[in-house]
Image (spheres, rainbow, N blue to C red):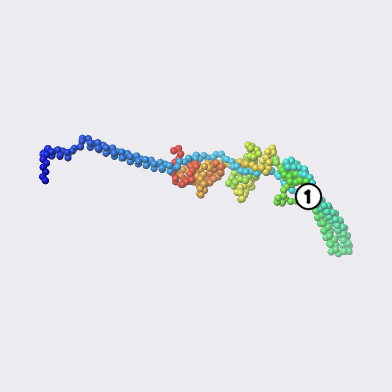
């Protein structure tokens, strides 16, 4: 069907083209470019901020992985210390007194703590068996002397008869030999009597020197027997307490510090705060294989009687400075399979583990014999996880 719409004409055609052409408002393109630039800037800033946060996080993590350590300042020890050792106080002269004859205690005269003089009577023993033996020995001597006199007279007569040729030389020699035997019997009987009478003197127990009775193990009527066998207690013990000695066992590695005439100080529990002095008397000069120590003896003047034998003393054994003068606190030590070690810091702030030998253990510190030098920077309280080459940071830097 034909379009009967009237033609709009040239003006209507022109309006349609203008609408299709539609130009943008002035400045809109510029604002669009600015918005796009702003969006790009915001995106770049956001990405940069995120990257910076990631970098800082990684840097913080790395920083946390590097441990911070304290460095010990090493100073040479110009003064020596002292080694505390236990000592055993003993009387310089002490005599346990045992029975030399068997018998019963008749009487005792002194008790423990009593001062005695040399030759003073301590106790008396009743020895009836010994008394009977002495009487028998006297009778044997008399009998032997009578037989000897008879043999001497007979031998003399036979010598006269032999000179006259009345008897043979064989008979004369027989009588002479009999006289020799009788002489020997007299000497034997006399020696036996002397032995028994000497033993009779041991019925009296006397002090061998001036001193103090430190033990008594007798009572009236008690049976005592001869001998000092295992477990046998002395009847008395007399000790000279004016001069004492201290026995000290010094470890082998300090043996070179034992010098003639050296003095030590010591203390005892019964006199807290008081310091005593002792002088070296003798050294065993040999190491006891069972203990690895050397027995050393020091003498003490005990004129005031302040010390007692058998007591314990704590000796301060003087020692010079360490072998190389390096003293390290115990907190720097590391116990490893390779031995005792310390952690040092090199010029690049890297850990270097060094094995050391200890010359002297002072408890809170040790003197190092070898393995480090005074120039080494030693780490205090090192971590057990430290290995050679680990990077660390020094506190305060």
In the displayed structure image, the side of residue 74 where residue 180 appears, left or right = right
Q: Which residue is mark 1?
A: 103
Q: Is residue 26 left or right of residue 219?
A: left
Please provide percent x and percent y for residue 318: 60, 41
In the image, 236 versus 349, the foreground residue is: 236
Give residue 30's position: percent from left, percent from top: 23, 36
Q: Quadrant of the C terminus?
A: top left
In-front residue for pair 19/50? 19
Q: Secondary structure at mark 1?
A: strand
Q: Position of residue 290 (x, y in %)?
A: 61, 50
Query: Quarter-wise, where is residue 177 in the image?
Result: bottom right
**Vertically, is 75 above or below 135?**
above
Q: Residue 45 versus residue 85: which sits nearer the camera?
A: 45
Q: Label 1 neighbourhood size at 10 Å, few (<14), some (14-19), many (20+)?
A: many
Q: Is residue 349 visible?
A: no
As drawn, which residue projects farthest toward the top? 26
Q: Residue at x 82, y 58 (%)?
A: 181
Q: Nearer the viewer, residue 373 or 342?
A: 342
Q: Residue furthest front?
A: 1
Q: Residue sitting at 69 percent across and 37 percent down?
A: 304
x, y percentage for residue 158? 87, 61
At 78% from the left and 47% from the top, the residue drawn is 221
Count of marks overlaid on the render: 1
In the figure, residue 173 lies in which quadrant? bottom right
| Residue 291 visible in the shown view | yes
């Amino acid at each position: 069907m034909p379009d009967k719409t009237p033609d709009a004409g040239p003006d209507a055609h022109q309006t349609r083209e203008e609408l299709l052409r539609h130009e943008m408002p002035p400045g809109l393109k510029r604002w669009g470019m600015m918005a796009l630039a702003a969006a790009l800037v915001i995106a770049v800033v956001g990405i940069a901020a995120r990257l910076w946060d990631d970098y800082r996080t990684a840097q913080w993590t790395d920083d946390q992985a590097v441990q911070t350590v304290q460095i010990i300042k090493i100073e040479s020890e110009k003064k020596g210390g002292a080694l505390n050792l236990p000592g055993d106080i003993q009387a310089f002269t002490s005599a346990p007194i045992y029975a030399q004859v068997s018998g019963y205690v008749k009487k005792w005269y002194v008790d423990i703590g009593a001062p005695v003089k040399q030759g003073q009577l301590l106790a008396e023993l009743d020895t009836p068996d010994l008394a009977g033996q002495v009487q028998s020995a006297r009778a044997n001597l008399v009998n032997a002397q009578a037989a000897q006199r008879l043999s001497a007279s007979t031998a003399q007569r036979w010598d006269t008869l032999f000179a006259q040729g009345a008897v043979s030389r064989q008979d004369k020699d027989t009588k002479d030999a009999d006289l020799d035997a009788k002489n020997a019997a007299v000497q034997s009987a006399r020696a036996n009597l002397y032995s028994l009478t000497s033993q009779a003197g041991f019925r009296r127990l006397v002090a061998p020197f001036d001193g103090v009775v430190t033990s008594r193990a007798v009572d009236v009527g008690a049976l005592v027997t001869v001998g000092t066998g295992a477990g046998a207690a002395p009847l008395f013990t007399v000790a000279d307490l004016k001069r004492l000695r201290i026995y000290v066992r010094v470890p082998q590695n300090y043996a070179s510090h034992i010098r003639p005439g050296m003095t030590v100080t010591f203390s005892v529990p019964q006199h807290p705060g008081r310091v005593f002095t002792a002088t070296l008397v003798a050294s065993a000069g040999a190491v006891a294989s069972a203990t690895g120590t050397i027995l050393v003896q020091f003498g003490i003047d005990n004129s005031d009687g302040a010390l007692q034998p058998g007591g314990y003393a704590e000796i301060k054994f003087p020692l010079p400075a360490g072998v190389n003068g390096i003293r390290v606190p115990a907190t720097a030590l590391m116990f490893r399979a390779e031995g005792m070690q310390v952690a040092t810091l090199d010029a690049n702030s890297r850990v270097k583990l060094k094995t050391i030998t200890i010359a002297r253990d002072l408890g809170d510190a040790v003197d190092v014999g070898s393995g480090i030098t005074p120039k080494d920077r030693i780490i205090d309280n090192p971590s057990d996880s430290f290995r050679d080459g680990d990077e660390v940071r020094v506190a305060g830097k």
